[in-house]
Amino acid sequence: MDIHEYQAKEILSGFGVPVPMGGIAYSPEQAGYRAREIGGDKWVVKAQIHSGGRGEAGGVRVCSTDDELYDAAKSMLGKVLFTRQTGDRGKLCTRLYVEEASDIAREIYLGLVLDRETERIMVVASAEGGMEIEELSQEKPESIIRFTIDPAAGLQDFQARELGFKLGFGAELIGKAQRILRGAYRAFRDLDATMVEINPLVVTKSGDLVALDAKMSFDDNALFRRPSITELRDKSQEDRRETYAEDRGLAYVGLDGDIGCLINGAGLAMATLDMIKLSGGEPANFLDIGGAASPDRVLQAFKAVLMDKNVKVVLVNIFAGINRCDWVAEGVVAAFRELGLDLPVVVRLSGTNVDEGRRIIAESGLPIITAETLAEAAERAVAARPV
Ligand code: GDP
Ligand code: MN
């Protein structure tokens, strides 16, 4: 689960990481109040969306008058912003963060990620801040500093000092960097994060070190024991299709194609996506209906798949072990009747109660396209796409 910049800053600040003073605004007027509360004569208005790259997409604006604050806020609130990370669906901006502006001398990249190879938290840093890490690893790979933290010993002071040296810091900044790294590490470890990114971490002209931007992601499987993190969830920032499916206990991942998939078993689902691609099509989603799926669950799965308006064909592929083909068939028939389906549906059934399942489909009188094998099902789904 991802959270907003202002939420990540609040968390990190609680762990001793310095952040600029700021406040949330839901309207252009409120952005002005916030700026006056903060004081000073320069502020930054920042769109709160779950995405980086806001700067170049008009989602970060430095302002020095009331009018500028108003205009900046107005240009972001209620708008769908498109950044390099949002894809072509974009992200809706409904809240802003207003901050005192910082005078930047240098921008540093600092990230903490989970390294699966070493099973440790890895620190990633670069003196070339401001750029995204993907960009850095492409264009300036030699500038990237990496080291892992031993979970038993924790972050060692020498590691933080060494990082400071490599970033070209003097003694005073090294002390400050050490404190920030320690705070970010503790926040990561204590809250079951999977990522903490401070980009940029800036050296200000007055010689301070401040987190100017912050991002955190958390392990979904640990959220049950992190109620204070769970409540930071903002569903408006998530893929609507995935939220809908997740709320109904379905394992669904949204993709960009037009063939909606309803499959049992993650392995078969992956194989089906491959087969669709092999046949020249593009899947719209991954969806595993799970074991012993009732007709109603199949109906719910249809609803989840059809949430995606790009879907032009639905492919149902069942290899029933614990599942029952007759229940799945009943669910397909119910979907036609209750949802008034008017798009091609390809059904491939195999395994437990397959004869009964096929009979239900055949006797329904519905225009269901059937297939015997996975390959045949994928080919028929691709062929059934309206041109
Ligand atoms: P992102 O584009 O979504 O990663 O948003 P950031 O918060 O990282 O802001 C993008 C860029 O805007 C930063 O790299 C800075 O160059 C600039 N910026 C952000 N806040 C300030 C600020 O307080 N003062 C100045 N001068 N520039 C800022
Ligand atoms: Mn950033």
Image (cartoon, rainbow, N blue to C red):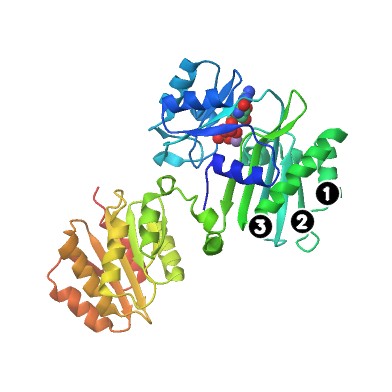
Which residue is under mark 3?
190
Residue flagged by tag 1: what amino acid is it? Answer: Gln
Query: Closer to the N terminus: mark 3 or mark 1?
Result: 1
Q: Residue at x 22, y 83 (%)?
A: 356
The mark tally for this picture is: 3
Which residue is under mark 1?
159
Q: Is residue 154 visible?
A: yes
Relative to 144, is 254 on the left or the right? left
Q: Residue at x 13, y 76 (%)?
A: 363
Q: Residue at x 59, y 20 (%)?
A: 42
Q: Secondary structure at mark 2?
A: strand
Which of the 4 image quarters holds residue 353?
bottom left
Q: Is residue 174 above or below residue 27?
A: below
- Observer-nearest residue: 216 or 167? 216
User: Residue 47: horizontal and vertical position, in percent?
Assistant: 49, 33
Cα separation between marks 1 and 2: 9 Å
User: Residue 254: horizontal and vertical position, in percent?
Assistant: 40, 54
Query: Closer to the N terminus: mark 3 or mark 2?
Result: 2
Residue flagged by tag 3: what amino acid is it? Answer: Asp
User: Residue 233: horizontal and vertical position, in percent?
Assistant: 47, 51
Relative to 57, is 105 on the left or the right? right
Q: Is residue 53 visible?
A: no
Q: Secondary structure at mark 1?
A: helix
Q: Residue at x 45, y 47 (%)?
A: 234
Which residue is under mark 2?
149
